[in-house]
Image: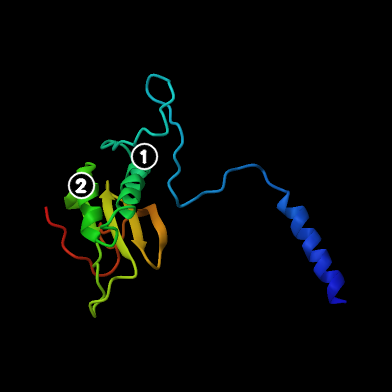
Amino acid sequence: MTRPLALLAMAATLILSGCSDGSPVPSSSPVSTPTATPSGTTASPSTPPALHPDGSAEDNLPVFAAVVAQVWAGERRASGSAYIDALGAAGFARADMEVTADESTVGNPAESIQFSVRWGKDRCLVGQVGPSTGDPVTAVLPQVDGGRCLIGRTVPVAP
């Protein structure tokens, strides 16, 4: 009796897996795709994303994600200050940044590090990296707790 049910379940799975509207599936990984430029031409995928100070948090997520990916690929990938420094060098305001500690309360390397940039009155660009995270994760999230981006204890970000 269980064998026919298993075959029926497998057949249903195969049939349903072919049913797709063709829409792309969202990914937490940055994707390099050509973008339209103001002149109407297509930019090369090798053109790095640029900061848009007057744009939305969503407009600036590509540059935030690119900076995070670049630091993650380097030797200082486990240092929260490396992400803060790189984001500052990319033009993000250090006064709007938060970062968690690189070490646990007992001195072990942190399983994950979170960092953020407050954007406008209600949005945050948030990143998370570390051994427990796998690939870097970046997202636009709402602000919490009176204009903060991260919940819990953070370390000071030097100006």
Circle 1 sits in a helix, a strand or a loop, which is it? helix
Identify residue type, mark 1.
Asp
35 vs 111: above or below: above
Going 16% across and 62% down the picture, which residue do you hit?
Answer: 156
Q: Can residue 57 be seen in this view?
A: no
15 vs 9: above or below: above
Going 23% across and 48% down the picture, which residue do you hit?
Answer: 86
Q: In the shown orientation, is residue 86 left or right of residue 142?
A: left
Q: In the shown orientation, is residue 135 left or right of residue 18?
A: left
Circle 2 sits in a helix, a strand or a loop, which is it? helix
Q: Nearer the viewer, residue 56 or 107?
A: 107
Depth check, mark 2 against mark 1: the one in front is 2
Going 22% across and 53% down the picture, which residue do you hit?
Answer: 84
Q: Residue furthest left?
A: 159
Q: Is residue 102 visible?
A: yes
In what quadrant of the picture does the N terminus appear?
bottom right
Q: Which residue lies furthest to the front in this view?
A: 75
Q: In the shown orientation, is residue 68 left or right of residue 40?
A: left
Q: Residues within 10 Å of mark 2 (few under 14, many from 20)?
A: some
Q: Which residue lies furthest to the bottom in this view?
A: 106
Identify residue type, mark 2.
Gly
Q: Which of marks 2 and 1 is nearer the N terminus?
A: 1
Going 16% across and 58% down the picture, which residue do you hit?
Answer: 157
Q: Mark 2 points at which residue?
A: 88
Q: Do the residues labelled 2 and 1 touch (CB within 8 Å)?
A: no
Q: Position of residue 47 (x, y in %)?
A: 36, 32
Q: Residues within 10 Å of mark 1 (few under 14, many from 20)?
A: some
Q: Where is residue 81 in the image (x, y as percent from the top left)?
A: 20, 58
Question: Gap between marks 2 and 1, in whole Å?
Answer: 17 Å
135 vs 34: above or below: below
Q: Name the residue under label 1.
A: 59
